[in-house]
Amino acid sequence: MAGYVCTVAGGKGGVGKTTTAVNVAAAMEDQGYDTVVVDADLGMANLGAMLGVEPETSIHQILAGGRAVSDALTDVQGGITIVPGEQSLEAFADADPAKLRKVIKTLRNAYDVVLIDTGAGLSHETTVPLGLADGVVLITTPDDVAVGDAIKTAELAERVDGEVIGTVLNRTTTETDVEAIADRFDSKLLAVVPDDIEATADEPLVLNAADSPAADAYRRLTDQLIGIFFEGLELDDVETAVDPEWFLDEDEDEDDDDSGGRFGLFG
């Protein structure tokens, strides 16, 4: 059976698309799903750099017609496989985003899960992955511009017959009005990921900072996605992955009378 293709998208740069893709991939592998992450951010590829690898072959070379998909497959920690990109302007100019469809078709026949890490903005290179995926996960931070751009990305996905599974809200704090942000989206809020400044280990956090709140959030998000991808879980039955304890200081008692108000999520 062919694997599930999920595009990780968002209109604004720096909201955590690559971080989300990497951590979900690591958590997927931990649960026995063979997973590959494709760096489709052709203009600002950073997947390889984030994971500390310098591969010889890139997605850009494949899309330029010079190399096979198998040449770029790169194994990294946690059993994850990636198809990395490169950052040169020459490589960007030569890469044809239209050829990504054939690349993904090849990968879906070899892996259980294909995660496509996309770039920012609304362009041809970011639109192609929206239309070829089985499902799209939107990534945003609480920043109003980021939320607005994610909504635009959802609208674009609909225009190219892409299916938005839901949204992940990254870098959330006790001051974030999560409910108000969730109400702006037509799709389900899949997970609320805390702004975990203490999780400073190299990515993926689920391996290198496994006890951190952010890592726990990504694992719970992955459980949701596994249910959707493979177990027939209906989106209406998905419960947002969030835990008030992620937002408590070490010296704060979770039973404090004001903890709910300080948490400030969902009323």
Image (tube, rainbow, N blue to C red):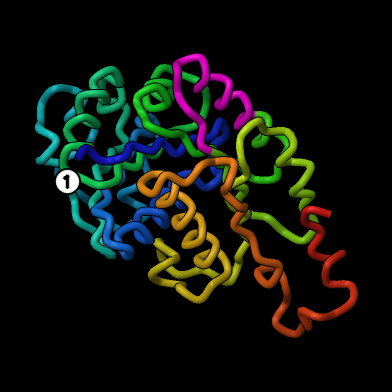
- Part of the protein shown in magenta: 149-165
Q: What crowding class fits label 1: few (fewer than 14 Cα within 10 Å), some (14-19), or many (20 or more)?
A: many
- Residue 142: name its quadrant: top right
Please name the residue that numbered disc 1 is placed on.
73
Total numbered labels placed on residues in the image: 1
Left-right relation of 107 to 179: left
Q: Residue at x 38, y 30 (%)?
A: 43
| Residue 175 within the magenta-colored segment of the rendering | no
Percent position (x, y) of residue 102? 20, 24
Q: Secondary structure at mark 1?
A: loop
Q: Is residue 191 above or below residue 87?
A: below
Quadrant for the N terminus in the image: top left
Residue at image point 17% right, 33% down? 106
Could you tell whether 74 is left or right of 166 in the image? left
- What amino acid is labelled 1 in the image? Leu
Query: Nearest the camera: 6 or 234?
Result: 234
- Residue situated furthest right in the rendering: 257
Where residue 39 appears, x then y in whole percent?
Answer: 33, 39
Residue 109, given in percent of the width and then of the height, sits at 17, 37
Residue 94 seen in this snapshot? no
Q: Residue at x 74, y 49 (%)?
A: 178
